[in-house]
Amino acid sequence: MGNKNSKITSQDRAILDLKVQRDKLKQYQKKIQLVADRETQIAKEALLKNNKRGALLALKKKKYQEQLLSKTDAQLLNLEQLTQSIEFALVEKEVFAGLEQGNLILKEIHNETPIEKVEKLMEDTADAIAYQNEISEALSGKLTSEDEEEILAELDQIVKEQLVDKLPPVPEQIPQQQIPQEQKAETKQPQKENKQLEAALEAA
């Protein structure tokens, strides 16, 4: 299905008219060829009847038709060349329009990112990298091996402190109700033995 929104231009109409004329000329050539063939047949029939004069007349008519056919061949060639030239020119026009549009878009992009901004960005980036390199060199030049060991030790200490902070708190006193009965009996037995030992020493 064709596109209903497509617009027929004057160039399209010109190409269509040329193609219509070309088709008409081809139809005309077919008619001329039929007439020429017919005149040849008439000439043959006239000779069979010993009518030489009639045969010559038919051949003259045939010759005239052949001359017309040659002229139409030249006209047909001109029409086809003209049609192809117009079609190629339209293609070139569309290509040129596409290139022109692309060039405008490139200009808009270049206007949005001027060369001055690009150069400034590159300079800032280079300065930042150079500054960072200077800091790295300065630090690496002033720190000794002992400094490096102290820094590592401090780092380990911070890690340990963080681990301790994450451990749950230890209760200061265990409630009496949580101590098993066996542990209470074991605790009372040494106290009783100590009292007996003290009484024996006093008696002695």
Image (cartoon, rainbow, N blue to C red):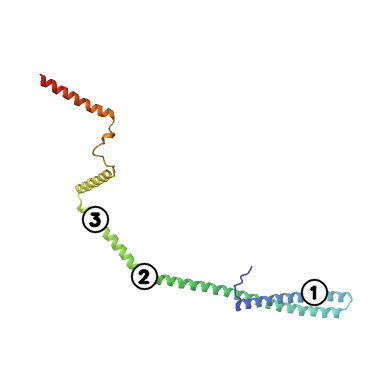
Marks 1, 3: nearer the viewer: 3
**Secondary element at tag 1:** helix
Farthest residue in the right direction? 49
Residue 101 position, x and y percent, is: 49, 72
Q: Where is residue 20 in the image (x, y as percent from the top left)?
A: 68, 76
Upstream in the sequence, badge 1 or badge 2?
Answer: 1
Residue 153 percent across, percent down from the top left: 22, 45
Check the picture and name the quadrant holding the N terminus. Answer: bottom right
Which circle's residue, 1 or 3, is located before the other in the chain? 1
In the picture, the quarter occupied by the C terminus is top left
| Position above or below: 163 against 196 | below
Residue that badge 1 annotates: 37
**Residue wearing tag 2:** 115
Which element is circle 2 on? helix
Quarter of the image where one finds residue 127: bottom left
Disc 3, SS: helix
- Residue on which the image places disc 3: 137
Decide if residue 82 is in sight here: no
In the image, 50 versus 143, the foreground residue is 143
* Amino acid identity at mark 3: Glu
> Relative to residue 10, is residue 97 drawn left or right?
left
Report, in whole angstroms, how far the alpha carbon at label 1 lies from the one at label 3.
Answer: 103 Å
Q: Nearer the viewer, residue 31 or 107?
A: 107
Kind of residue at badge 2? Ile
Instruction: Looking at the picture, tell me which residue is in the foreground, 82 or 196.
Output: 196
